[in-house]
């Protein structure tokens, strides 16, 4: 009898232990996540970071003076510490984007193909797509901060990673990008249906990924001109024949339902807040003004045909008037022009890169002495025409706009950087980071700090501060990196940026 009781007791104890352990199992989460799902989630996080306009997350459209704040204007005055913008950016990119891209590649390499209908060649394409987006994400990190943890960054066994040299990282990324393109089979499929919200509906996704990778390579090559023009030339001339062509647009496609809505719709509309107006800087550059305002970016005699698609007149103004808010000041929402609501629908695709940008890049490459075909004027004109037509203008309106002396390539400005930089600034509407890269590379248009700038940042910032947590959690490496780049300041030029006016 005693033996029976002992056996029953042991059985009950083991049974109870098993039930208690079961309580630690999360039955709501997926036990296994596919590589395609990891890729898709990381891409959504990345593109949302690029397009985000929450003042805690990304303020490049304010720094580039397309948008001005209404009530909370310190961000337009360059306060990025009390909002923690560098911390948010770093956490998003390392934890939610780069780590998940790395895990997506690992899972794709190990998950079985049997029964999926996916060939080994298609799997190679999927891995190449993940790598292309990984390079894109890393380039964003380095272009924002400069020297950053890279070689040791995603290893959980190294809690205090070293900061790698920004130029070394950038060149390695270009090599990785070239290797990823070499693995693409352009006649083969990429991600399965539903897992590529960028090129998945084109029917030609591998070829489009190849074009994007080359256009990105072209841009990255130009970013390095001031630091290594021979290397820049090699990279640019290799990429140029394979970039986006007329009509090509790389967009993130969203849904009408949360949480997969256009991030700018979330920030401007779904939030229920009236936080932004369009600035006088861009509105005055898009319509005739007399006299021209101080620090006028561009004086035109013909209204830019994109203005009515970018913004709306001041509500209730008769006749309708476009009037922009002041950068770095409190702007009453009803008193100024707002972003046109056609840009702010839940499922509106958000442009990541396009033919317009490719043409501006080619114009720049020719002015820098590179052999990429055509003339700078031809590519410049193509870019301006493409932008106007994309936003809703007509071909005739584009030609009328280009015919103005202040816009025509032969007469616009004496400095080619000002010609291209000004028109690129007008074309990259709602694309803050693309604007910022162009501005830092070309140094045009001339943008000025608002009168009550903060933190002694008396010019437009050219980098993000390092995340403040690094000063305590990774102090030695932070101090070494800060000293190496010339100080952890928003006005410290990065490795690719050799002029701050």
Image (spheres, grey):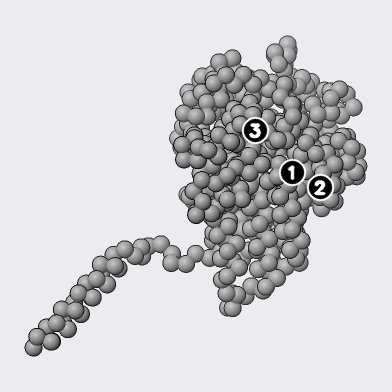
User: Which percent across, then down, holds residue 76?
Assistant: 56, 24
Tell me the tag on residue 485: 3
| Element class at badge 3 | helix
Q: Residues within 10 Å of mark 3 (few under 14, many from 20)?
A: some
Quadrant containing the N terminus in the rendered view: bottom left
Residue 293 higher or lower than 396, as above or below: above
Please report contact status of discs 2 and 1: CB closer than 8 Å, yes or no. Answer: yes
Q: Residue at x 43, y 67 (%)?
A: 31
Q: Which residue is mark 1?
A: 220
Q: Residues within 10 Å of mark 1 (few under 14, many from 20)?
A: many
Residue at image position (58%, 56%) is: 101
Q: Earlier in the sequence, mark 1 or mark 3?
A: 1
Of 332 and 395, nearer the camera is 332
Give left or right: position of 177 versus 467. Answer: right
Residue 113 drawn at (x, y percent): 60, 75
In the image: residue 211, left or right of residue 448: right
Disc 2/disc 1 C-alpha distance (Å)? 8 Å
How far apart, in angstroms, are the residues tagged by discs 2 and 3?
25 Å
Q: Please report the residue visible at 86 percent of the width from the left and 22 percent of the height from the top.
A: 414
Say whether residue 117 is visible.
Answer: yes
Q: Which residue is situated farthest in the left direction here?
A: 1
- Residue 150 lies, with reference to residue 452, above or below; the image says below
Foreground: disc 1 or disc 3: 3
Q: Measured from the top left, where is residue 281 in percent x and y?
A: 66, 22
Q: Residue at x 74, y 63 (%)?
A: 184
User: Mark 2 = which residue?
Assistant: 235
């Amino acid at each position: 009898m005693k033996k029976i009781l002992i056996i029953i007791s042991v059985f009950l104890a083991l049974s109870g232990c098993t039930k208690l352990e079961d309580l630690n199992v999360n039955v709501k989460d997926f036990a296994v996540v596919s590589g395609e799902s990891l890729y898709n989630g990381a891409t959504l996080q990345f593109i949302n970071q690029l397009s985000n306009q929450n003042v805690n997350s990304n303020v490049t459209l304010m720094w580039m003076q397309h948008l001005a704040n209404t009530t909370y204007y310190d961000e337009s005055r360059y306060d990025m510490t009390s909002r923690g913008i560098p911390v948010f950016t770093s956490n998003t990119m390392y934890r939610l984007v780069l780590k998940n891209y790395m895990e997506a590649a690992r899972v794709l390499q190990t998950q079985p193909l049997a029964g999926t209908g996916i060939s080994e060649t298609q799997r190679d394409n999927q891995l190449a797509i993940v790598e292309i987006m990984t390079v894109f994400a890393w380039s964003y990190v380095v272009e924002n901060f400069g020297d950053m943890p890279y070689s040791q960054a995603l290893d959980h066994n190294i809690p205090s990673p070293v900061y790698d040299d920004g130029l070394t990282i950038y060149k390695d990324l270009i090599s990785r990008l070239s290797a990823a393109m070499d693995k693409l089979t352009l006649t083969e499929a990429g991600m399965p249906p539903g897992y590529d919200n960028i090129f998945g509906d084109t029917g030609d996704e591998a070829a489009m990924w190849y074009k994007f990778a080359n256009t990105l390579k072209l841009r990255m090559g130009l970013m390095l001109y001031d630091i290594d023009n021979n290397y820049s030339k090699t990279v640019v001339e290799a990429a140029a024949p394979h970039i986006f062509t007329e009509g090509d647009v790389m967009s993130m496609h969203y849904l009408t339902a949360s949480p997969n809505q256009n991030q700018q719709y979330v920030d401007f509309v779904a939030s229920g807040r009236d936080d932004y107006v369009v600035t006088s800087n861009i509105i005055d550059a898009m319509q005739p003004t007399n006299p021209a305002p101080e620090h006028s970016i561009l004086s035109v005699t013909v209204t830019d045909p994109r203005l009515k698609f970018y913004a709306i007149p001041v509500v209730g103004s008769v006749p309708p008037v476009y009037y922009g808010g002041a950068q770095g000041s409190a702007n009453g929402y009803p008193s100024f022009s707002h972003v046109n609501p056609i840009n702010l629908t839940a499922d509106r695709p958000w442009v990541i890169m396009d033919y317009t940008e490719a043409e501006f890049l080619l114009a720049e490459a020719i002015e820098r002495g590179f052999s990429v075909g055509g003339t700078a004027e031809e590519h410049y004109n193509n870019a301006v025409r493409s932008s106007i037509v994309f936003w809703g203008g007509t071909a005739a309106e584009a030609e009328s706009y280009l015919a103005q002396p202040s816009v025509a390539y032969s007469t616009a400005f004496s400095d080619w950087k000002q010609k291209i930089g000004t028109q690129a600034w007008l074309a990259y509407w709602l694309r803050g980071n693309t604007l910022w890269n162009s501005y830092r590379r070309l140094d045009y248009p001339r943008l000025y700090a608002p009168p009550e700038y903060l933190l002694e940042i008396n010019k437009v910032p050219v980098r993000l501060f390092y995340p403040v947590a690094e000063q305590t959690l990774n102090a030695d490496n932070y101090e070494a990196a800060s000293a190496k780049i010339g100080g952890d300041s928003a006005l410290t030029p990065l490795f690719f940026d050799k002029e701050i006016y």
